[in-house]
Amino acid sequence: MQPMLIFNEGGLDHDPGVQHPERASRLLTLSNFNKRRPDLAERVETLSSQTLGERKALRLVHSLDHLSHLHEIDEQGGGMIDGDTVMSSASYQAALCGVGAGLAGVEAVRHGAPFAFAVIRPPGHHASVNRSMGFCLLNNVAVAAAVLRDQGERVLVLDWDAHHGNGTQDIFYEDSRVFYVSLHEYPAFPGTGALHETGRGEGIGCTMNFPFPSGTGEAVYLEAFDEVLVPVMEQYRPTWILVSAGYDAHYADPLTDLGLRSYTFFLLTARVQELARQHAQGRLVFFLEGGYNLEALAASFETTLEALLVHQGEADRRPTGDGRCREGHEVIERVRSLFLSYWDL
Ligand SMILES: [Zn+2]
């Protein structure tokens, strides 16, 4: 079975407004990757999906009130949820298709695909049990993680979008069966994702935040992986890995101020793939989140696929330049000392 790319076609019709950065051209640009990179396209199976996420799966994450609220706005032909989050007539359908594409990715990997990538919009990681916000209506990755959790799996959700995935964190904050890790710019939207947010109750020690200052670059991200995330995962031993793959931490992104380049996502992906191989029998599913510079989005998406399809080996460990290394390094040291209470580091 080949790796699977699932484009949620319904996502093309979601229209939050002409000036909105989360626009259909993001999906169109990525769906053109077969013209830009035929060498990669021939190694994957591509599926255009309009399958809706099942209500039973949605209800593992979202309240009935929340789903009814979105349904009501949909019945009215759309409307504004907040200043950033807008529904058009096709938006609810698009969001349901996004959830469906993510679940299809999980099923593809369950049936032997080496990995799957759900190329979806609207994004999902800011959506919580009761609330849509930050361009997100339904939490795609959380629905997939909840389905797997209820099947007895231990799930790592790795979120490298530039923004903190407050929705995903909230949903699993007291749940040790889903480990949520986020690397993000801080302070920035949505304002959450501080160091001390480490989980609650049974979930204590299973939420890990790296709140990086603006300008943080590749060397610090790699250090966070190699020095903290990998050793903790050697102890947590996830059986599935889901990635909230936003590409707005790229230096060219107009919404944020982090300093990654396209190739950084190659390096991060190679590490994630290694983790999946070691602990999760390779089971790895990616969910598109943000990324608002089309060229950077496409290039970063392609380096992710390149790492998965071509490299397939030990991650490249050559040192990289990083102008703001010290402050980012201090964040990692603080995360490490905080997590000494929960894990052997
Ligand atoms: Zn983002």
Image (cartoon, helix red, strand yellow):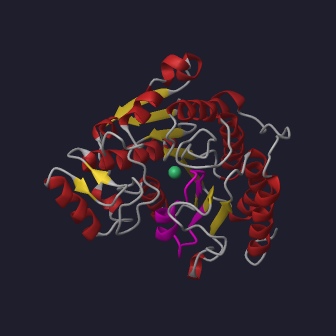
In this rendering, the answer to whether 268 lies above or below 144 is: above
Q: Position of residue 175 (x, y in %)?
A: 53, 73
Of residues 140 and 213, the one drawn nearer to the viewer in this rendering: 213
Q: Give the farthest residue toward the left.
A: 76
In this rendering, the answer to whether 63 lies above or below 17 is: below
Say if the magenta span includes residue 178.
yes
Q: Residue at x 68, y 58 (%)?
A: 213
Of residues 26 and 344, the one drawn nearer to the viewer in this rendering: 26
Residue 177 in view in this figure: yes
Q: Is residue 308 left or right of residue 229?
A: left
Q: Which residues are magenta?
A: 157-180
Q: Position of residue 218 (x, y in %)?
A: 74, 45
Residue 231 in view in this figure: no
Q: Position of residue 46 (x, y in %)?
A: 44, 28
Q: Residue at x 41, y 43 (%)?
A: 22
Q: Position of residue 203 (x, y in %)?
A: 58, 75
Q: Which of the 4 image quarters holds residue 62? A: bottom left
Say if the magenta span includes residue 40.
no
